[in-house]
Image (cartoon, rainbow, N blue to C red):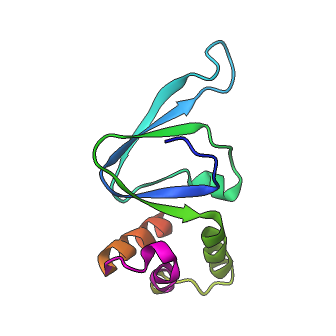
Amino acid sequence: ESATKSCAYVILRGCVRILERTTSGRNQNQLYYKEDLCSGEMFDEDILTGNHTRIIEAQAMSDVDLAVVEYVDFMRVQGREASGIMSVDNKIEFLRMVSIFRSWDEHLIAKVAAVAMQKE
């Protein structure tokens, strides 16, 4: 689904096909295959740091559960990381405070924290 919000997505279950729009040239605004992502991977994280505008579309390849990482939550985590106090355990603890993660099992929260660590 195409969206204009400032958020990224973590794939919790299933696979997603990422399509990218061309922004110039003869075939401007056409979609082409970029990559397939599966459980534990994240997409659209660059939009959170202002590195690009959203020019991708994601199509579910199967039943998919996604976690939405909102810009305000991302910036809160970034602020703690910049101060040097955000360990893996701190990230898990922080994620538990985010409303969408409150009811999640420990292993799912740890998986999201691990994805965040890989992106650093």
The residue shown at (59%, 57%) is: 7
Q: Position of residue 5 (x, y in %)?
A: 63, 53
Question: With respect to residue 11, does 37 lie above or below?
Answer: above
Between 118 and 43, the one nearer to me in the picture: 43
The residue shown at (38%, 75%) is: 109
Q: Main secondary structure of the magenta part?
A: helix
106 lies left or right of 54: left
Residue 36 lies in quadrant = top left
108 lies left or right of 52: left
Residue 82 lies in quadrant = bottom right
The residue shown at (46%, 82%) is: 96
Residue 57 shows up from this direction: yes
Q: Position of residue 12 (x, y in %)?
A: 35, 60
Magenta region, residue range: 90-105
The residue shown at (52%, 26%) is: 31
Residue 119 shows up from this direction: no
Residue 10 lies in quadrant = bottom left
1 lies left or right of 51: left
Q: Position of residue 50 (x, y in %)?
A: 71, 53
Question: With respect to residue 33, does 44 lie above or below?
Answer: below
Number of numbered discs visible in the structure rendering:
0
Question: With respect to residue 35, does 41 lie above or below?
Answer: below
Q: Position of residue 91 (x, y in %)?
A: 50, 80
User: Does the magenta-highlighted stretch encompass residue 119?
Assistant: no
Between 75 and 104, the one nearer to me in the picture: 104
Question: With respect to residue 8, does 101 lie above or below?
Answer: below
Most extreme residue toward the top is 26
User: Does the magenta-highlighted stretch encompass residue 92?
Assistant: yes
Position of the C terminus by quadrant: bottom right
